[in-house]
Image (tube, helix red, strand yellow):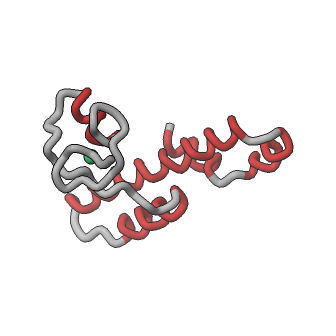
């Protein structure tokens, strides 16, 4: 069964709503809003894209917006790297000490 919100084609998870709309409902936000398309890029791809957009910023407003996007993308990759380290098997954990996300941790602090 699909989400009860018109135009949302995600599967219903709770109270006939998808997770995104359920979360909006729970936070008291307007539910009848189309959700942003969830980023389908991997964290690495999203960071690369954000970095390229940042580099191409044309004015101060653009620069600030894209700086925020870049920061979020970096945090997402760092978060993914941390999750990976927590869930990885011991053999993988040793290898993951070179995981690129670690380089980003100081940037995100
Ligand atoms: Zn929905």
In the image, 63 versus 26, the foreground residue is: 26
- Tell me the quarter of the picture where residue 36 sits: bottom left
The answer to whether 1 is drawn above or below residue 7 in the figure is above
- Tell me the quarter of the picture where residue 83 sits: top right
| Residue visible at 25% across and 27% down in the picture | 26
| Residue visible at 57% across and 48% down in the picture | 104
Question: Is 3 positioned to the left or the right of 51 in the image?
Answer: left
Question: Is 64 positioned to the left or the right of 87 in the image?
Answer: left
Question: Is 64 positioned to the left or the right of 106 in the image?
Answer: left
In the image, 20 versus 88, the foreground residue is: 20
Is residue 64 at least partly visible in the picture? no
In the image, 25 versus 62, the foreground residue is: 25
Is residue 78 at least partly visible in the picture? yes
Question: Is 8 positioned to the left or the right of 48 in the image?
Answer: left
Can you give x and y, in whole percent of width and height, for residue 25 in the image?
22, 32
| Residue visible at 41% across and 62% down in the picture | 50
**Farthest right residue?**
91
Can you give x and y, in whole percent of width and height, for residue 48 in the image?
49, 65
| Residue visible at 22% across and 44% down in the picture | 4
Can you give x and y, in whole percent of width and height, for residue 30 in the image?
13, 37
- Number of marks in the rendered image: 0
């Amino acid at each position: 069964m699909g989400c009860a919100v018109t135009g949302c084609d995600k599967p219903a998870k709770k109270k006939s709503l998808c997770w995104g709309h359920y979360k909006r409902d729970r936070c008291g936000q307007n539910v009848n809003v189309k959700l942003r398309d969830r980023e389908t890029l991997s964290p690495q791809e999203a960071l690369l894209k954000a970095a390229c957009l940042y580099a191409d910023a044309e004015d101060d407003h653009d620069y600030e917006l894209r700086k925020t996007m870049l920061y979020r993308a970096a945090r997402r990759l760092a978060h993914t790297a941390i999750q990976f380290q927590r869930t990885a098997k011991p053999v993988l954990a040793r290898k993951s000490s070179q995981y690129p996300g670690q380089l980003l941790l100081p940037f995100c602090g």
